[in-house]
Amino acid sequence: MNPRASATATALVVILLAAGTANAGSATADTNPPPTPESSTPTAPVEIDPTAPGLKLPEGATLAPPKVLDIVSVTDEGTVSASQPVQRQETSNSTVTYALQAEVLFSKDSATLSPTAASRIQAIAGDINARDVTSPIRVFGFTDDLGSSAHGDVLSKQRAEAVYQILATQLAALGNPSHTFQVRGYGEDYPIADNSSESGRSQNRRVEITFTPPSA
């Protein structure tokens, strides 16, 4: 190697070392590294001062009246897609609601029940009968926002009527023909999902059966 090339290489090494030293100065050590099994030890809970002003009601203030929260449990049965149940049961402190996907009950734009629809409605009738429901049973139909609003109103009412007919027949066969019903079609009103996607529209096309158990 000639003297000029050797001098150039030496200068390059000096520059790189200087740059590395400058960069190293900008890094900071972790002053609070994660504990290891050998070094971790339990710590005492934070002490709370029971006389702290923030833990007391202001003078003259009273607690709000107690109330029971309307807690809802949701049970999905089967799926049309990963996020779309074919049947959903919602149970709160006051009501039970079965939401049935229209695709499971009817053909497209039809109010004629599919062959498998009767067995689903029969199971719901059995639940209503087992709970000794005496309050009115609500059967409400809903559609998406495709087509005219008037068409959706008619179709949702026809579908609610079809479900009601089977439900009333099944309840009568179980020995209780005295149930009262509220049957309505709400069309595209009261969506439960975004109508801008087919997945959302499919969820909105549904028939809901709602009742209040005597113990509620």
Image (cartoon, rainbow, N blue to C red):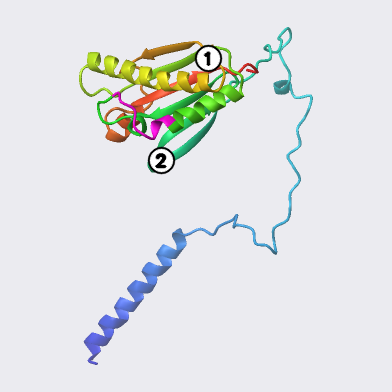
Query: In this rendering, which labeled residue sits more in front, label 1 or label 2?
Result: 1
Q: Main secondary structure of the magenta part?
A: loop
Q: Which mark is residue 73?
A: none
Left or right of 39 on screen, residue 21:
left
Is residue 104 something one can see in this rendering?
A: yes
When the figure is inspected, residue 156 is found, relative to residue 46, above or below; the finding is: above
Q: Magenta segment range? A: 111-118
Q: Nearer the viewer, residue 100 or 118?
A: 118
As rendered, which of 152 and 119 lies closer to the eye? 119
Q: Which residue is mark 2?
A: 79
Is 113 one of the magenta-colored residues? yes
Q: Is residue 76 above or below residue 13?
A: above
User: Residue 67 versus residue 101: which sits nearer the camera?
Assistant: 101
Q: Position of residue 67 (x, y in %)?
A: 65, 15
> Residue at coordinates 23% horizontally, 13% vertically from top-left?
150
Q: Amino acid at mark 2?
A: Thr
> Is residue 182 depicted above or below 191 in this figure?
above
Pointer 1 residue? 177
Is residue 158 within the magenta segment? no
Which image quadrant for residue 174?
A: top right
Task: Locate residue 63 relative to residue 27 in the image: left or right.
Answer: right
Picture coordinates of residue 44, whole percent (x, y): 76, 45
Q: Residue 188: in sight, yes or no? A: no
Using a 10 Å C-alpha cutoff, classify the residue at mark 2 as few (fewer than 14 neighbours), some (14 to 19) or many (20 or more). few
